[in-house]
Image (cartoon, helix red, strand yellow):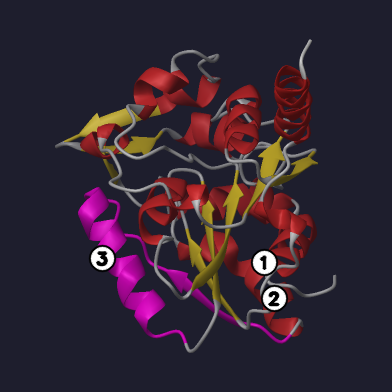
Amino acid sequence: MNTLHKLAAISAIFLAAAFATGASAQTVNPVLSRNVVLVHGAWADGSSWAEVISRLQAAGLHVTAVQNPLTTLADSVAETRRILALQDGPTVLVAHSWGGTVISDVGTDPKVTALVYVAARAPDADEDFVALSKKFPTMPARAGVEEHDGFTRLSEDAFIKYFANGVPHAKAEVLYAVQEPTAASLFNERTTAAAWRSKPSWYAVSTQDQTISPDLERYLAKRMKATTVEVDAGHLSLVSHSKEIADLILAAAGRSK
């Protein structure tokens, strides 16, 4: 083997090792950020972030939860951009569930220093995410989707058992009562950007998720080369394991736990 071929082989080994270990932009220190913007997902509203918000505020961060309209991707992106425009300085953009679609589009904004995905979608630009998700197991929460006049809700049984598994029953009932109707067309819409390709990213996999396959979450985290944690939680880890989620956001903001 000549010298050129030896160098090529060595380079290939290092590239393969980097991909296998999830090496990424997180090899540099995260930018110190004071602002956090939180984007909720389908069948939820901003109150689902309540316990995470209180922990982040106690750490001295300025936190805003977007009230995501869940009507069209364009509407959700526009609302998130309005909130982002109000932030003064570097901002960590965080999403749960379908909200990951929004931050993948909005996260290219120069103010955004890091992205945090919590059991969230993380589509590539113009990707058919429904087709991608069909390569992974369909989770039981989907059977509880009810559609009326073009909008969907989860049945109470599916919400409590599968969407909010691991959340105390009384709290899950409150979250069921405030779930935001979600346009049925929303899940097929495609992003125009994939901010995770250019911004440092963090991902919290919910190992007991009954709404999005944990294996799909792991695939997405690996694809974006995210700093990844696995949380022994259902889909609403931001509610049942608020400390772990807040700690991940603090890390993305360059703050110690």
- Residue 69 picture location, percent across and down: 29, 59
Q: Which residue is disc 1 drawn over?
A: 52
Q: Does dot 3 land on a helix, a strand or a loop? A: helix
Residue under pointer 3: 78
Q: Is residue 74 left or right of residue 200?
A: left
Give the Cα distance between marks 2 and 1.
Answer: 6 Å
Q: Which residue is mark 2?
A: 56
Q: Earlier in the sequence, mark 3 or mark 2?
A: 2
Is 177 in front, or is 234?
234
Report x, y in % for residue 143: 43, 19
Label 3 crowd bin: few (<14), some (14–19), many (20+), radius 10 Å = some
Quadrant of the frame with the C terminus: bottom right
At a point 68% along the width and 82% down the height, the residue shown is 57
Q: How far across and how far down the image is residue 133, in percent?
A: 45, 22
| Residue 79 is inside the magenta segment | yes
Q: For numbered disc 2, what is the local secondary structure? A: helix
Q: Given the current orientation, which residue lies at the most extreme right position?
A: 257
Query: Which image quarter: residue 208?
Result: top right
Q: Which residues are magenta?
A: 60-87
Q: Name which residue type carries label 3.
A: Ala
* Tag 2 and tag 1, C-beta contact below 8 Å: yes
| Front residue (pair 242, 119) | 119
Residue 180 percent coordinates (x, y): 36, 52
What residue do we see at 50% from left, 16% from top?
138
Residue at 78% from the left image edge and 20% from the top image edge? 6
What is the spatial separation of the Cα atoms under label 1 and label 3, in whole angstroms? 24 Å
Quarter of the image for residue 137 reads: top right
